[in-house]
Amino acid sequence: MLKKIKNYDYVHTTDFDFKALCKLLSQENYDLAVEKIKALAKEIQVKNLALDKSSYTRNVIIHNNDCWLGLLHWDKGATTRIHGHPEQAFLYVVEGELRCKNFDKNPLTELKSKGLSGGEYLYSKGVKGKLDNCIHQINAKQKSISLHYYSDNPIKGEVFDI
Ligand SMILES: [Fe+2]
C-alpha cells in the first residue's frame, strides 16, 4: 500500500525573497540561484518542517501556474515512486543525503544512480508540456531536507512503477 505524501504550507520567519529565487531558477540562472539558496539554507529551521515517519512531506513555499517551490523533509529510508518531471526540475540538498536513481523509459530501464549531500544540487530540462522528463527515484540515506523547484505542479508528474 502506497503512502499518500502530505503537503503543508511552509512558514519562513525571515523576509527571504522566494519569488526572486523562482525567477532565477526559471531563467536557469543556477549559479546565482544556488548562492541565494546557500544563504537561505542557514535560515531554514527543521522545526518548521513537517515530518512523516518513514516517508517525506512537501512543505510548499510557492505554487502557481509556472512555479512550484518547496522544501521536502525526508525521514531516513523514505523512497519516492519512480516518476517523471515537467520541463524544468531543480533539487538542492540543504542537509542530509539523497540517492537519485535515473531511468530510461520504453522499456523502463535503470540507469546510473548518483548520491547528493548537503550543498549539492541537480537540475534537468526536458520537453515543455510533458511530465515524463528526467525519470528517477529518490531515496533518503538519512533524515534530509531538500529544496525543489519545478516549472509545473510536481504532483502531476507521471508515475512509472506499478
Ligand atoms: Fe523527482
Image (cartoon, rainbow, N blue to C red):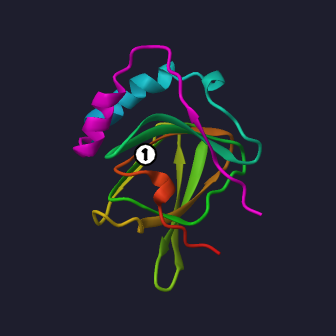
The residue at the point 39 percent across, 15 percent down is 15
User: Between residues 122 and 44, which one lies in front from this camera angle?
Assistant: 44
Q: Indicate the quadrant containing the N terminus: top left, top right, bottom left or bottom right.
A: bottom right
| Residue 59, above or below 89 | above
**129 vs 24, nearest the viewer:** 129
Q: Which quadrant, please, contains the C terminus?
A: bottom right
Three-letter amino acid code at the position of disc 1: Tyr
State the residue at coordinates (60%, 45%): 97
Q: Is residue 131 left or right of residue 48?
A: left
Find the magenta span and give its range. Answer: 1-29
Please say whether residue 20 is one of the residues in the magenta stretch: yes
Instruction: Sort mark 1 into few (<14), some (14-19) or many (20+) by Cα contacts within 10 Å.
Output: some
Figure quadrant of residue 34: top left
Residue projecting furthest to the front: 65
Whole-percent x and y of residue 114? 51, 59
Q: Which residue does the numbered mark 1 point to in the structure image?
A: 121
Asked which secondary structure carries label 1, the reply is strand
Q: Is residue 68 magenta?
A: no
Q: Residue at x 66, y 56 (%)?
A: 79
| Foreground of the two, 63 or 115 | 63
Queried on whether the Cβ of the residue with tag 1 lies below 8 angstroms from ligand 1, the answer reads: no
Label tally: 1
Residue 137, x across and y down, in percent: 57, 62
Instruction: Give the image location of residue 152, x and y in percent.
Output: 37, 52
Between 41 and 153, the residue placed more toward the observer is 153
Who's the residue at 49% across and 21% down the image?
Answer: 42
